[in-house]
Amino acid sequence: MKGDGVSIVTASVVLHDREKAVEVGQSVLRSQLAAGYNLFPVESAFWWKGEILQGDEFMVLFKTTARLVDALVGRVVEMTGAEVPDVFVSESSHVDERYRAWVEAGAKG
């Protein structure tokens, strides 16, 4: 499964608003900074400015390449305007070659 081809990564961002999550996802997808994305409702709890906050949020999980991830993160940060952007990137160590080819074909930048 692990190949010497393009390095595949996932990038996630958590946003408070579903409409904004879809807007960010579609913008990244249209610009081909990712081959696709998933949108998940999540329950969050976290420290913020001395208080514990809880609430419903939305996580967007992008499928992209290592070559494009910096541009993708830049787009997400720019579009969200968050004081502390909740963006996490993870490199995939084992990827089916058919999946790798799909991501590479869709994420052209």
Image (cartoon, helix red, strand yellow):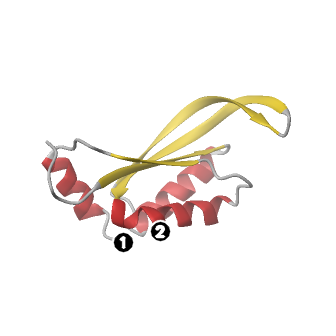
- The residue beneath circle 2 is 71
Specify the quadrant of the image occupied by residue 105: bottom left
Question: Which x, y percent locates residue 60?
Answer: 50, 45
Element at label 1: loop
Quarter occupied by the N terminus = top left
Q: Residue at x 20, y 48 (%)?
A: 99
Image quadrant for the C terminus? bottom left
Is 91 placed left or right of 60 in the picture?
A: left
In this rendering, is residue 37 above or below 54?
A: below
> In what element is the residue under mark 2?
helix
In the image, 64 versus 25, the foreground residue is 64
**The one of 17 and 76 positioned closer to us in this rendering:** 76
Q: CA distance from mark 2 to mark 1?
A: 8 Å
Please give left or right for residue 107 compared with residue 53 in the image.
left
User: In front: 75, or 25?
Assistant: 75
Q: Which residue is mark 1?
A: 109
Asked if the residue at tag 1 contacts the one at tag 2, i.e. Cβ–Cβ closer than 8 Å, the answer is yes
93 with respect to 5 (left or right):
right
Give the amino acid type for the residue marked by disc 2 in the picture. Ala
Crowding near pointer 1: few (<14 within 10 Å), some, many (20+)? some
Q: Disc 1 residue type?
A: Gly
